[in-house]
Image: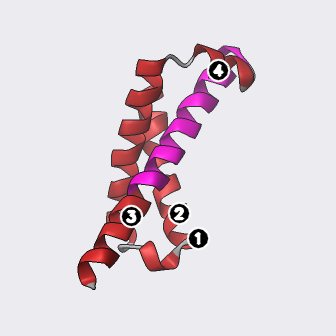
């Protein structure tokens, strides 16, 4: 369940990052796919580093765990999308 939350949040994070930074957008499908990949990477990172402290800061209990996965997924999705968008722009020059 936590992985699903991170993947969906990653897709949303990638799409929102593309909407904010329009020049980095790669199209809806690629934005979403990059976000999902970033959500997976964010989930892996937060699971590896330990999410207990962050979960407590975000409300503790189930709410904190869900919020932790959502934040990790969204940030991971946005970061991966921006990296891909910047790479595409550099290669286009």
Q: CA gap, disc 1 to disc 3?
A: 12 Å
Q: Name the residue tied to disc 4.
A: 55
Indicate the colouring scheme.
Answer: secondary structure
What residue is drawn where x is 53% and y is 31%? 69
What residue is drawn where x is 39% and y is 70%? 28
Circle nearer the N terminus (3, 2): 2
Comparing 56 with 66, the one in front is: 56
Dots 4, 1 in contact, CB < 8 A: no
Q: Position of residue 6 (x, y in %)?
A: 46, 37
Dots 3, 2 in contact, CB < 8 A: yes
Q: Is residue 6 above or below residue 11?
A: above
Report the span colored magenta.
Answer: 60-80
Q: Is residue 15 above or below residue 52?
A: below
Would you say residue 47 sits in the magenta stretch?
no
Q: CA gap, disc 4 to disc 2?
A: 24 Å
Q: Name the residue tied to disc 1.
A: 20
Q: CA gap, disc 4 to disc 1?
A: 27 Å
| Viewer-nearest of discs 1 and 3 | 1
Q: Name the residue tied to disc 2.
A: 17
């Amino acid at each position: 369940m936590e992985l699903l939350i991170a993947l969906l949040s990653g897709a949303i994070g990638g799409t929102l990052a593309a909407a904010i930074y329009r020049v980095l957008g790669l199209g809806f499908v690629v934005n979403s796919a990059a976000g999902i990949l970033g959500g997976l990477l964010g989930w892996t990172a937060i699971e590896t580093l330990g999410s207990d402290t962050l979960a407590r800061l975000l409300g503790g209990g189930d709410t904190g765990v869900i919020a932790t996965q959502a934040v990790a997924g969204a940030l991971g999705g946005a970061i991966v999308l921006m990296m891909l968008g910047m790479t595409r722009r550099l290669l286009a020059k």
